Image (cartoon, rainbow, N blue to C red):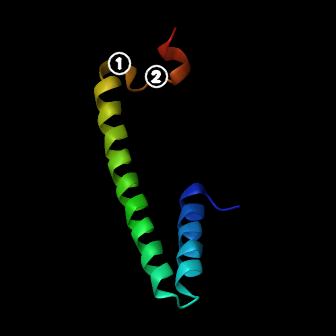
Amino acid sequence: MPGPARWSRLTDRFHELIVQRPGNKTLAVQGAVLHDIVATHTELWRGHMDSAAAYLLKDDLRDKPVVELFS
């Protein structure tokens, strides 16, 4: 089974083909718009999580496993 990153790329490509291959321009445009929305949301969410991690897990907490944070 492929890793998560590869699986995500393959799934994305599969759905892209599903909406483009029938030749329906409306479906293709809607699929492209949805793809852009998801891609933008993913870039913004990743940035938010990176910022939150930098703020919340600073100093000595950065390298501790989650289980030990509550010890």
Residue for point 58% across, 56% down: 4
Q: Element at badge 1?
A: helix
From the viewer's side, name the closer residue of 67 and 33.
33
Q: How far apart are marks 2 and 1 (CA)?
A: 7 Å
- Left or right, 19 with respect to 55, comes to right
| Residue 7 or residue 39, whichever sits in front | 39
Q: Is residue 22 above or below residue 33?
A: below
Q: How crowded is mark 1: few (under 14 residues within 10 Å), some or many (20 or more)?
A: few
Q: Is residue 33 above or below residue 38?
A: below
For residue 38, the mark is: none
Instruction: Find residue 43 and report its horizontal and vertical position in percent.
Output: 35, 54
The residue that appears at 53% across and 59% down in the rendered structure is 5
Indicate left or right for 36 with 15 as reference: left
Q: Residue furthest front?
A: 26
In percent of width and height, residue 52 lies at 33, 32
| Farthest residue, direction right | 1
SS for callout 2: loop
Give the class, few, some or many, for how many residues have Cα within 10 Å of label 2's Cα (few <14, many ≥20): few
Can you tell which quarter of the image residue 38 is in? bottom left
Residue at the top extreme, as displayed: 71
Amino acid type, residue under disc 2 in the picture: Lys
Query: With 29 as the anchor, is 7 left or right in this view?
Result: right
Residue to which mark 1 is pinned: 60
2 and 1 marks in contact (CB < 8 Å): yes
Residue depicted at 50% across the width and 11% down the height: 70
Amino acid found under the numbered disc labelled 1: Asp
In percent of width and height, residue 26 lies at 46, 82
Instruction: Return the residue at label 2.
Output: 64
Picture quadrant where residue 55 is located: top left
Q: Residue at x 57, y 88 (%)?
A: 21
Q: Where is residue 60 in the image (x, y as percent from the top left)?
A: 35, 18
